[in-house]
């Protein structure tokens, strides 16, 4: 979308992973604070744009053990993040919550910016049909990083099985062996496989629910995982933590399950299982989400009207 907006404006766009091919005083768009800092210092760009997709220092604290090395990395990335937020001519944020985070943390003034959630999919055709919603089939798609809360997802499903013995779980991940090991440790049966993007889209259309479980921490408060658009675009009913605040704020439908704890999650799924899914209503609700929240054309127009 950003590329399309820039091209429509008559800009010449090229991609690079290093500084060598970038002429001095170019217009530069970066997708993380460290690259912004390096480009700003060494290429003296005439215009800078940074796309903030996550709050990096807090993410590092989650990814690595708490030791001196991690602390130094956090300090370093806090410096480059502050530098980027203050020196960029234009900023892209993934949520209102991210904007507020930077206002509170760095005293960011809220200068020229656009808020645009992360998404890379559209609403698929022919995904709304009664038979797919008849049985409690669940999906987990993604890696097993600590913030993805895979083990909590397994615990929720295990508790669900006590009430829904026919419930099934399919796991699509690159980390097949690790997933199987965690399932065995928890005494849970599930299908585990690694699928290409095309294959995954086909598989998602066969299930009823999709899990997005997250902890109640800052990293998730500001996040807009692409997984949500993928699930909704495939006609799945998302089961997601309300710590994903942007989704609670922007997505409205009775065919969404948002929860604050594992017990509430189980209870809400059991309530959903009592309902007959209204195909026209779920289709209309999901179409509205893509027309209002995940509308590529709308964001391109917004970028065209606001980019410096």
Image (spheres, helix red, strand yellow):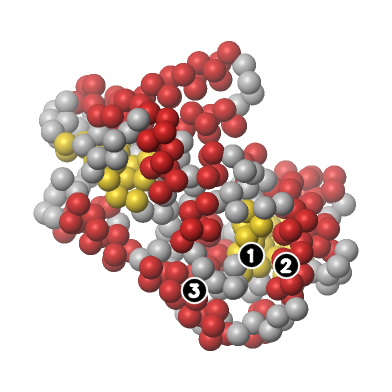
Task: Give the quarter of the figure containing the C terminus.
Answer: top left
Q: Residue at x 75, y 53 (%)?
A: 262
Where in the figure is residue 125, as x and y percent of width and height? 47, 79
Give the mark nearest the N terminus, 1 or 2.
1
Question: Is 74 left, or right, of 209 in this rendering?
Answer: left
Where in the figure is residue 232, as x and y percent of width and height? 53, 68
Where in the figure is residue 138, as x and y percent of width and height? 70, 65
Distance from Cα at disc 2 to Cα at disc 3: 19 Å
Residue 258 visible in the snapshot: yes
Labels 1 and 2 touching (C-beta < 8 A): yes
Q: Nearer the viewer, residue 189 or 208?
A: 208
Q: Which mark is residue 181?
A: none
Give SS at disc 1: strand
* Mark 2 lies on residue: 269
Question: Is 47 left, or right, of 140 in this rendering?
Answer: left
Q: Is residue 90 above or below residue 183?
A: above
Rendering quarter of residue 107? top left
* Mark 1 lies on residue: 257
Labels 2 and 3 touching (C-beta < 8 A): no
* Mark 3 lies on residue: 286
Between marks 1 and 3 in the image, the one whose residue lies nearer the viewer? 1
Q: Is residue 18 above or below residue 91?
A: above
Q: Residue at x 46, y 19 (%)?
A: 75
Give the mark nearest the N terminus, 1 or 3.
1
């Amino acid at each position: 979308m950003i590329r399309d907006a820039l091209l429509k404006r008559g800009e010449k766009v090229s991609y690079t992973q290093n500084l060598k091919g970038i002429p001095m005083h170019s217009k530069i768009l970066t997708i993380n604070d460290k690259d912004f800092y390096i480009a700003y210092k060494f290429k003296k760009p005439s215009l800078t744009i940074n796309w903030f997709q996550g709050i990096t220092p807090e993410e590092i604290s989650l990814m690595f053990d708490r030791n001196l090395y991690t602390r130094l990395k956090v300090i370093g990335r806090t410096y480059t993040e502050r530098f980027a937020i203050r020196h960029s001519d234009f900023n892209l944020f993934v949520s209102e919550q991210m904007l507020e985070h930077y206002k509170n943390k760095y005293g960011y003034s809220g200068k020229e910016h656009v808020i645009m959630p992360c998404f890379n999919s559209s609403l698929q055709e022919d995904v709304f049909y009664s038979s797919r919603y008849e049985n409690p089939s669940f999906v987990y798609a993604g890696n097993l990083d600590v913030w993805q809360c895979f083990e909590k997802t397994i615990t929720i499903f295990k508790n669900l099985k006590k009430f829904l013995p026919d419930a099934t779980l399919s796991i699509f991940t690159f980390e097949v062996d690790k997933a199987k090991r965690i399932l065995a440790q928890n005494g849970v049966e599930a299908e585990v496989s690694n699928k290409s993007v095309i294959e995954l889209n086909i598989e998602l259309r066969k299930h009823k629910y999709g899990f997005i479980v997250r902890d109640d921490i800052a990293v998730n408060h500001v996040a807009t995982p692409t997984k949500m658009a993928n699930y909704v675009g495939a006609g799945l009913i998302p089961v997601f933590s309300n710590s994903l605040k942007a989704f609670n704020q922007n997505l409205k439908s009775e065919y969404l399950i948002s929860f604050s704890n594992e017990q509430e999650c189980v209870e809400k799924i059991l309530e959903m299982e009592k309902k007959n899914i209204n195909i026209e209503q779920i289709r209309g609700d999901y179409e509205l989400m893509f027309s209002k929240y995940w509308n590529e054309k709308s964001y391109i127009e917004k970028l065209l009207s606001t980019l410096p």
